[in-house]
Image (spheres, grey):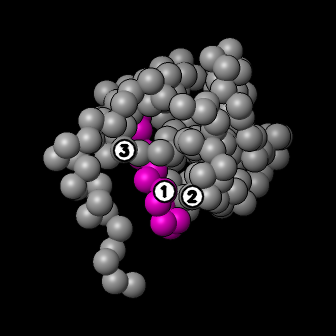
Amino acid sequence: MKKTIAIGCDHAGFEHKAAVVALLEKEGWTITDHGTHTLDSVDYPDFAHPVAQDVQQERTTYGIVLCGSGNGVAITVNKYAGVRAALCWLEEIAALARQHNNANVLALPVRFVTQEQSLAMVHTFLHTAFEGGRHQRRVLKIAPTTV
């Protein structure tokens, strides 16, 4: 599997993102960093949309989005067909998001988790396989059949 990942955050997620990028580089991932690159106040959708587009168009295998609660970025990226973002605040939830939901984007609520917890969730998310089987049937039912 090609190890490619897109990452994006708002100002709240900036410091966690820097730590996550360092971990990803250490693990040999090719990273597309969509920002933000400062602590200045910004709008989270501006950084979440490019991550979702990279995942949807298969330019990257996974995405990571970070903001204060994780909700804004998760809502934004989940608007894209084929993107399955999971808002995680525990390592176990990150594992289940991959095992049962085949999540391809991890959303982190940086105001509610430590950097160490974020790094642990990223590691778990990226090293946990989708179980398939009965879960595949359920994942296929996520997308609406009519629009």
What residue is shown with label 2?
56
Q: Position of residue 10 (x, y in %)?
A: 69, 48
Q: Quadrant of the N terminus?
A: top right
Amino acid on which disc 3 is placed: Asn
Residue 102 - label? 3
Residue 93 in view here: no
Q: What amino acid is found at the position of numbered circle 1 in the picture?
A: Val
Point out the residue furthest to the left here: 134
Q: CA distance from mark 2 to mark 3?
A: 14 Å
| Circle on res. 19 | none
Location of residue 15 (image quadrant): top right
What type is the residue that disc 2 sits on? Gln
Taking 78 as reference, is 137 left or right?
left
The residue at the point 48 percent across, 29 percent down is 126
Point 34% across, 83% down: residue: 146
Q: Quadrant of residue 60?
A: top right
Measuring from the top left, give residue 71's x and y in whole percent: 48, 53
Q: CA distance from mark 3 to mark 1?
A: 10 Å
* Farthest residue, direction top: 26
Tell me which numbered mark, 3 or 1, is placed earlier along the sequence. Answer: 1
The residue under label 1 is 83
Q: Earlier in the sequence, mark 1 or mark 2?
A: 2
Q: Nearer the viewer, residue 101 or 94?
A: 101
Magenta range is 78-90
Which is the main secondary structure of the residues drawn in magenta?
A: loop
Q: Residues within 10 Å of mark 3 (few under 14, many from 20)?
A: many
Sequence-wise first label, 2 or 3? 2
Q: Tell which of 117 and 124 is nearer to you.
A: 124
User: Could you tell me which secondary element the residue under label 1 belongs to?
Assistant: loop
| Image height of 61 relative to 75, above or below | above
For the residues labelled 1 and 2, the Cα–Cα distance comes to 6 Å
* Residue at x 26% of width, y 41% of height: 132
